[in-house]
């Protein structure tokens, strides 16, 4: 396929992985990214010379696609495995939730409820048909196996954490996928949860892949927002950037669906409408930089619905603090439904509200240990996939000839993590590689 030119729109982990796979097969690839850096949601911020993840990310010990890319890109020596812990904050108390003993002694649930919760986890491992899960409301599925008491105490707060006010129409696939994914990280009879981290975050992989791409001829253009994906006679002709149309044999978009819809004025109306109607959750994710460790847990789940943030994620219980200037990093996320007014809160209002509840949770915390409070936010984070809308998931091959797409809407029923995204990028690349010989034939004619 040497000589076929492909534009990849979006330089997040999906776009860079696509460029890597296609350039290995001899395609001439150009990546356009509107931001100052590659990475998208996996980008970083500099703090006193250290690269910190803007948002927290995990690489599980079972994430083989990610680990393969890490090895191929030459940064395997910067990958570290760590045993992590999690806890629950319930009714003003913190409880560990890691080993079978913790599970059996978990005070918020009685013995029978603990048994039913364990049954739910086991049941998810044996149910292999995600299509079946897609037709069942998540609440119905969880209550049927776990019971109403467990649902109210454990599952409902977790659904609130992930979906804000949109959880009523969520299919069972979301919890089913999460349970199956997380059980892959457990090792041994103690059920220790194993995770991995890259020194300097996800961007270490993105940066290394980009170097490999450039060695294979890929061109990266930063601060280069696409103004239009140009279509002529039903076929992609190129992209318009900086007022100039750049011709390409094919274009692959990795943008969120509504953003892509705005770049396709000549695409079929029905296709554009399907893209435009796709809704996403946003996120408010303040980062608290501390001098000392706050908790022994990587994640503390919160059952108290009066607290605006839905978890306490101390990533330096996974990442060695030596890689972040010795600081301890605590993320306090809140996923936002499209109509949540918190999305418009100024940073100071977020800080005031968040810290009020943080003090209530940790009354003995010494605020002199706070180094900084930095609010990070993003509009398009997690696609909302209500029940009965599978037919609204776009295809890799769009109705526009030689226009392809790959985004987190399309990885359903998997979760929007780096492992699923990189595997789907490989799938998109395979489709392009399969189709490319026909381009050559048509051009020759």
Image: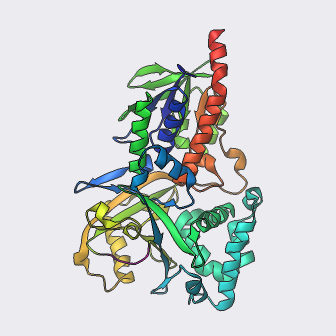
* Direction front: furthest residue: 77
> Quick one: which residue is furthest to the top in this view?
445
Q: Is residue 312 above or below residue 10?
A: below
Q: How many labels does the image show?
A: 0
Q: Is residue 159 visible?
A: yes
- Say left or right for 287 vs 283: left
The image shows residue 92 at horizontal and vertical percentages of 45, 87
- Residue 329's spot in the image, x, y percent? 34, 67
Say which quadrant the C terminus sits in: top right
Asked if the magenta segment contains residue 276, the reply would be no
Residue span colored magenta: 293-297
Q: Quadrant of residue 175?
A: bottom right
Q: Where is residue 7 in the image (x, y as percent from the top left)?
A: 50, 28
Give above or below for 257 relative to 201: above
Residue 258: quarter of image? top right
Give residue 432's position: percent from left, percent from top. 61, 31
């Amino acid at each position: 396929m040497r000589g076929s030119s492909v534009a990849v729109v979006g330089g997040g982990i999906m776009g860079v992985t696509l460029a890597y796979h296609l350039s290995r097969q001899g395609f001439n690839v150009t990546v356009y990214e509107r931001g100052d850096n590659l990475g998208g949601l996996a980008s970083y911020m500099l703090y006193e010379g250290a690269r910190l993840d803007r948002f927290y990310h995990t690489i599980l010990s079972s994430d083989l696609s990610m680990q393969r890319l890490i090895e191929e890109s030459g940064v395997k020596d910067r990958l570290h495995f760590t045993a992590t812990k999690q806890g629950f904050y319930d009714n003003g108390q913190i409880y560990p939730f890691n080993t079978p003993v913790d599970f059996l002694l978990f005070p918020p649930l009685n013995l029978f409820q603990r048994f039913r919760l364990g049954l739910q986890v086991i049941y998810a491992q044996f149910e292999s048909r995600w299509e079946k899960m897609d037709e069942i409301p998540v609440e119905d599925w969880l209550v049927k196996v776990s019971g109403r008491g467990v649902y109210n105490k454990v599952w409902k707060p977790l659904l609130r954490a992930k979906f804000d006010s949109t959880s009523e129409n969520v299919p069972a696939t979301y919890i089913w996928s999460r349970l199956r994914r997380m059980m892959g990280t457990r090792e041994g009879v103690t059920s220790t949860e194993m995770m991995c981290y890259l020194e300097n975050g996800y961007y270490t992989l993105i940066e290394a892949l980009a170097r490999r791409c450039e060695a294979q001829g890929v061109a990266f253009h930063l601060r280069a927002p696409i103004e239009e994906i140009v279509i002529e006679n039903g076929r992609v002709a190129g992209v318009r950037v900086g007022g100039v149309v750049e011709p390409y044999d094919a274009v692959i978009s990795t943008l969120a669906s509504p953003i892509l819809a705005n770049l396709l004025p000549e695409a079929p109306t029905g296709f554009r409408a399907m893209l435009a109607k796709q809704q996403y959750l946003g996120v408010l994710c303040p980062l608290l930089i501390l001098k000392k460790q706050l908790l022994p847990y990587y994640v503390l789940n919160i059952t108290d619905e009066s607290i605006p943030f839905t978890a306490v994620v101390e990533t330096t219980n996974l990442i060695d603090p030596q890689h972040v200037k010795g600081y301890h990093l605590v993320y306090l996320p809140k996923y936002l439904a499209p109509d949540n007014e918190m999305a418009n809160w100024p940073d100071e209002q977020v800080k005031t509200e968040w810290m009020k509840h943080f003090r209530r949770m940790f009354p003995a915390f010494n605020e002199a240990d706070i180094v900084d409070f930095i609010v990070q936010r993003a509009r398009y984070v997690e696609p909302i996939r209500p029940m009965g809308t599978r037919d609204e998931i776009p295809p890799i091959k769009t109705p526009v000839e030689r226009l392809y797409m790959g985004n987190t809407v399309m990885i359903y029923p998997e979760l929007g993590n780096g492992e699923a995204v990189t595997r789907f990028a490989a799938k998109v690349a395979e489709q392009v590689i399969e189709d490319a010989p026909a381009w050559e034939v048509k051009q020759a004619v």
